[in-house]
């Protein structure tokens, strides 16, 4: 079970779809999380352009104007989804892993900008999460860093980082160490760098060789 998460910054555009599709195929991705679709609804045809050949299912949460928007695309032979929970800032899939039947909960996140709004989001998600009901995988653009080392040439807010770390620790989550570049958000022609995108998982999730990219 391999995951891919990507802030698409607008789902329309053939080059983006072709690139994501090539990543999915080359890395044998079975579950895709997309942030900032910037549309109210993502059609099946649009999802197919990102997925390529083979069966898939999808779910989306609407943007507010051109702000936000979330989508999950997955292989139904890998996970069986029973419940979808939609919110402006998160999109949750609840189901089970095909084959072993273990419950799994997938949370696609695009966090708001302000520190207070992010704190409310962390509290809302914490109220939903139940570690006794299956694995948890949180993916997306959290719009927060965990330390000053995760920002370069941009403002670091200690309170925001503390709130984010408290959310991670209080829910018993682990950050999956991703490969590649240290920073995931590049702005102002490469002058401002931040690590905003990540995977957070329940400790027992990776025991069977699951991979996230």
Image (spheres, rainbow, N blue to C red):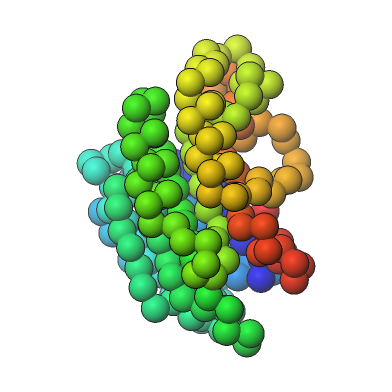
Q: Quadrant of residue 21?
A: bottom right
Image coordinates for residue 198, horizontal then vertical, percent: 60, 44
Q: Quadrant of the N terminus?
A: bottom right
Instruction: Please say whether residue 73 is visible from this viewpoint.
Output: no
Q: Quadrant of residue 91?
A: bottom left
Image coordinates for residue 157, horizontal then vertical, percent: 50, 17
Decide if residue 191 is on the left or right side of residue 128: right
Q: Looking at the picture, does residue 151 appear above or below residue 98?
A: above
Please tell me which residue is depicted at 53% across the width and 26% down the height of the picture.
161
Task: Name the one closer to the observer, 47 or 88.
Answer: 88
Q: Quadrant of residue 203?
A: bottom right
Decide if residue 201 is on the left or right side of residue 133: right
Image coordinates for residue 18, horizontal then vertical, percent: 56, 57
Total label count?
0
Q: Looking at the picture, does residue 57 appear above or below residue 174?
A: below
Please tell me which residue is depicted at 48% across the width and 25% down the height of the picture.
160
Q: Looking at the picture, does residue 188 appear above or below residue 103?
A: above
Image coordinates for residue 5, horizontal then vertical, percent: 56, 52
Please tell me which residue is depicted at 56% across the width and 34% down the height of the picture.
165
Farthest residue toward the bottom? 99
Task: Name the one closer to the observer, 40 or 154.
Answer: 154
Please tell me which residue is depicted at 40% across the width and 61% down the height of the picture.
92
Instruction: Please say whether residue 152 is visible from this viewpoint.
Output: yes
Decide if residue 4 is on the left or right side of residue 44: right
């Amino acid at each position: 079970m391999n995951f891919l998460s990507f802030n698409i910054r607008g789902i329309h555009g053939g080059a983006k779809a072709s690139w994501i599709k090539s990543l999915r195929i080359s890395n044998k991705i079975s579950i895709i999380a997309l942030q900032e679709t910037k549309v109210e609804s993502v059609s099946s045809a649009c999802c197919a352009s990102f997925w390529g050949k083979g069966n898939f299912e999808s779910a989306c949460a609407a943007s507010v104007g051109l702000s936000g928007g979330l989508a999950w695309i997955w292989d139904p032979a890998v996970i069986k989804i029973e419940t979808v929970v939609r919110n402006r800032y998160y999109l949750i899939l609840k189901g089970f892993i095909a084959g072993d039947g273990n419950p799994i909960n997938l949370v696609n996140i695009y966090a708001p900008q302000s520190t207070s709004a992010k704190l409310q989001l962390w509290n809302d998600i914490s109220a939903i999460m139940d570690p006794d009901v299956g694995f948890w995988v949180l993916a997306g653009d959290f719009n927060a860093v965990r330390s000053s080392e995760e920002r370069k040439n941009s403002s670091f807010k200690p309170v925001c980082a503390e709130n984010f770390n408290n959310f991670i620790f209080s829910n018993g989550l682990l950050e999956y160490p991703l490969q590649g570049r240290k920073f995931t958000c590049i702005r102002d022609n490469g002058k401002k760098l931040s690590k905003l995108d990540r995977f957070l998982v329940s400790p027992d999730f990776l025991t069977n060789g699951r991979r996230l990219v």
